Image: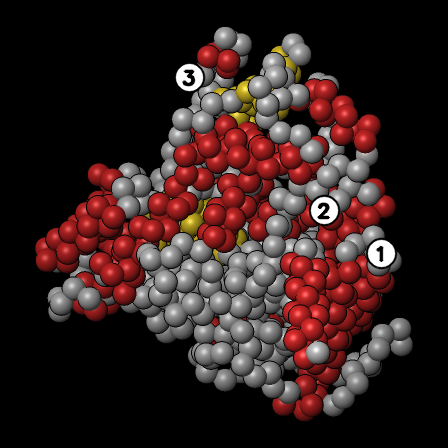
Amino acid sequence: MHKYRLILALLAASLCYTTLSYAEDGYRLWLRYEPIENEAIAASYRDAIGPVFAEAKSKTAKIAIDELDRGLNGLLGTNRSSLPPHLLVGTPQTAHIKELGLDLSELGDEGYLLTRHGDNTVIAANTDQGVLYGVFAFLRHLQTQSPLQDLQVASAPKIDHRLLNHWDNLTRTIERTMVGASIFNWFDLPYYIEPYYHDYARACASVGINGTVLTNVNANATVLRPQFLEKVKALADTFRPYGIRVYLTARFSAPVEIGGLDTADPLDPAVIKWWNDKIDEIYTYVPDFGGFVVKANSEGQPGPQAYGRDHADGANLLARALAPHDGIVMWRAFVYDFEIKEDRHKQAYTEFTALDGRFEPNVSIQTKNGAIDFMPREPFHPLFGATPDTPHTLELQITQEYLGGDIHLVYLAPMWKETLESDTFAKGAGSTVAKIVDGSVFDHELTAIAGVANIGNERNWTGHPMAASNWYAFGRLAWDHQISSEQIADEWTRMTFGNDDSTVAIITKILLGSHQTVVDSSMPLGLHHIMYPGHHYGPGPWHDQGRPDWTSTYYHKASSDGIGFDRTENGSDALGQYAPEVVEKWRSPETIEDKFLLWFHHLDWDYKMKSGNTLWNELCLTYQDGVDRVAEMGKQWANLQGAVDDQRHARVTALLNRQLEDAKFYMDACLAYFQTFSQRPFPESIDAPEYPLEYYKSFELYHVPGHPGEQW
């Protein structure tokens, strides 16, 4: 009897495991390839596609054809066969593409053409890498149920180097993210290649990401030792067929820490030789190594200034050693010094404009979207357009360091588009940040964009089921910065949750409004850097201890006479670093957009806003509106019960409930604090803070994931 009970228990456990293994847990991201339920659409695709004719002579070509098989089998229940082909796939080196006489001259090495040619549907490119991108684009076309009758898509990337920056440590902790441990299992490498490395590479390739920086910008020199270079090689070999080159972060003091030298002076001959030898060694392991990202003389990281040298000296040391191997240096502009009494907003501009023209051709200044530090909203960095002889790598943060971690629902494409479309006026109107970065304004050949990854070893990769939209959006914008936030949201939603129009409408509405919602419920009207110190999760406008440029009071400058940082000519004159056309618009509170108001202006609490409200009332009402819209997101999501699978619906519901509590806490804490200066009553239409100020000031969160000061 006991034997049978054991058998029944094992069967039950097996059935339970089987059920769980098929649950929609988010692992497949936007590459789900679920069967198309509309049979009319599916039939039209089968007629237009038919069997596939392709040749796989390289690893990349095989991956492309395998992906096509996977996608067509999942979406249409069909596969390649020996019947006459209707879907032709390949390059001009294959006879079935060559005989079509297609013009692929504008596509370069990575672009692709999707077209109809007589009775055939064609995926063509100049290289197998382009074919892979074309296959993913074609499957995206099918997943979003777009028509094939007049298919004509020719696409090539506007930016050459499109990278994820992983802030991952060799210990597998990740700085500034809440999605578990690093996906890079350094201890097991190179002996075991995790199967999910291939799925990571597939996801990156599907949106055109072609580089990955494996290590944290707060670098560890250990990764440059031979024992780790063989691990880097294993990852590089895995990612290469997907078109992904690996990069590392270089710790400037490595010659001292692991090289046995007594100096890291970039002009010292022994140091120069050490880096030349080390970089030559790296290329013996990884022949297509991409190069280095460097954080130097910033937040405690070592750099050339310790030896009386400047950033150009440091960057050029590495660039000259990398140049024979076609490697590049992305030298971060995120530098500031609390000993310098200049507004932190100004310091990177001051530092790097003075060095313009001194960098080697394979150096790019890696510049954040704004001048402070990935705030929920920032005006574009004044460095864009200010160094005509030096290219810029635009650095965006996909992980949500100051936007509720990976706990809050925030779709970041609208924020990134705001930066990309900002006009620098560097060479007249139309000199947008996007055109600075893609090289078209100053004819720069080196073009790059980087996104700080939001990926960890959570089963769904990004923690919040909706946060994968930002990984996807970064890749799409890195490939083509002209794509709209709306198009990206629509694509991702259809690929991730299906094509039901009412479901898509609700989810895209939530996504497109989410960034403004989170700005308004945390740091509205141009307020910035008022988060909790250390882990940055939650409010801390009262923080005033330690170095001034790490405090909140340094930035909001709240007092009895008002709030905001005066960056006009009457204050720090950081505004003067922008073009005259920008200065003219932003110098006056009457003409600047409200979203940047307190970034550039210190105003009285009774200042009359464009809405007719006083500044104090507008601040209170904006916070309340942000909280109310978080609540509305929850209601909209609740309406999707039954339309979205239970597992993902439940997880997003729980996270939205927490986000609402967090938003209310943020509003209450900030308004309770700022009222001590404004001495004005709260508008009757808002919910006044629930507790006294001391409650919010004394509240602690412990062991917050992603906090570099804690091990968890």
Q: Amino acid at mark 2?
A: Thr
Mark 2 or mark 1, which is nearer to you? Answer: 1
Query: Pointer 1: residues within 10 angstroms few (<14), some, or many (20+)?
Result: few
Residue 416 x/y as whole percent: 60, 49
Q: Which mark is residue 93?
A: 3
Residue farthest to the front? 1
Query: Pointer 2: residues within 10 angstroms few (<14), some, or many (20+)?
Result: many
User: Residue at the spot x=38%, y=33% of the render?
Assistant: 445
Looking at the image, which is closer to me, 281 or 253?
A: 281
Looking at the image, which is closer to me, 372 or 608?
A: 372
Which circle's residue, 3 or 2, is located before the other in the chain?
3
Does residue 544 lie above or below 574 as drawn?
below
Residue at the spot of label 2: 493
In terms of image quadrants, where is residue 387?
top left
Residue 411 x/y as whole percent: 67, 54
Residue at the spot of label 1: 642
Residue farthest to the left? 269
Asked whether residue 560 is in view, the answer is yes
Dot 2 falls on a residue whose secondary structure is: helix
